Image (cartoon, coloured by chain):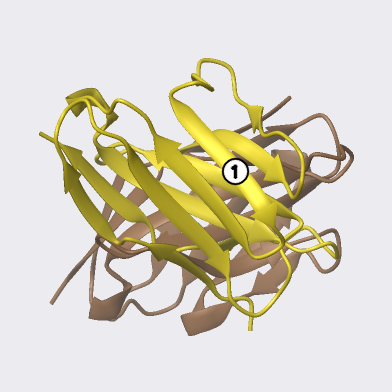
Amino acid sequence: AQSVTQLDSHVSVSEGTPVLLRCNYSSSYSPSLFWYVQHPNKGLQLLLKYTSAATLVKGINGFEAEFKKSETSFHLTKPSAHMSDAAEYFCVVSETGTGRRALTFGSGTRLQVQP
Amino acid sequence: GAVVSQHPSRVICKSGTSVKIECRSLDFQATTMFWYRQFPKKSLMLMATSNEGSKATYEQGVEKDKFLINHASLTLSTLTVTSAHPEDSSFYICSARGDRGYEQYFGPGTRLTVT
């Protein structure tokens, strides 16, 4: 079984300051991990993904995440927040060891960026 | 590449009627399509997984007779909400995956409102 826990339901930062969105996962198999962003009333956009290659993953729009197996974490970071980053962020796990490879979504973190 | 569309983007229907939502992969062949439901300010919940030409696999608690899924071709899957009720109002999102790799590409979602 697999699960994802996003530790913060809501994060508020000032424009230009760093962003940290926390995610912990649980998986019986080697996981693939993703971060998706969803703007209001929009679909999901893939920010980045980890698939057992480099543990530090760089994504779009300046986001990156580090896979830490010992901590079962996959936190999302960005050095400097922009107003356009305000959205809902989902951490997602997929178990690569199973044929089905279904995605399990975290509960989401709403990022607010203050001017 | 890897674009997935949904139609309609928004639909309002009366209680007791049926509504069909289409999910299309525009530039790749989707051997597997997934249907998710998202409640307001909540995460995505997988409803069902469908493989082209075979019956959909529904998640526990999802009524297969209420949410009819058809995946008749490699580029089209449909979700029909039968005898809709106000509690079926939600944001429905599809995703599609090709026969190579594991990444799912998400559609923009359909907002269903049942009055």
Looking at the picture, how far across and down is residue B34, in whole percent? 60, 46
Quadrant in which residue A51 is drawn: bottom right
* Quarter in which the C terminus of chain B is drawn: top left
Q: Chain of mark 1?
A: B
Judged left or right of residue B51, residue A87 is left
Q: Is residue A15 above or below residue B112?
A: below
Whether residue B74 is visible:
yes
Q: Is residue A106 above or below residue B58?
A: below
Q: Colour of chain B?
A: yellow
Looking at the picture, how far across and down is residue B22, in whole percent? 46, 56
Judged left or right of residue A18, residue B112 is left
Quadrant in which residue B83 is drawn: top left
Quadrant in which residue B4 is drawn: bottom right
Q: Which residue is mark 1?
A: B70
- Of helix, strand and loop, which one carries label 1? strand
Say few, some or many: other residues with alpha carbon within 10 Å of mark 1 (under 14 / 14 to 19 / 20 or more). many
* Quarter in which the N terminus of chain B is drawn: bottom right
Q: Is residue A115 above or below residue A89?
A: below
Chain coloured brown: which letter? A
Whether residue A9 is visible:
no
Judged left or right of residue A95, residue B36 is left
- Looking at the picture, tell me which residue is in the foreground, A101 or B107: B107
Looking at the picture, how far across and down is residue B85, in whole percent? 22, 24
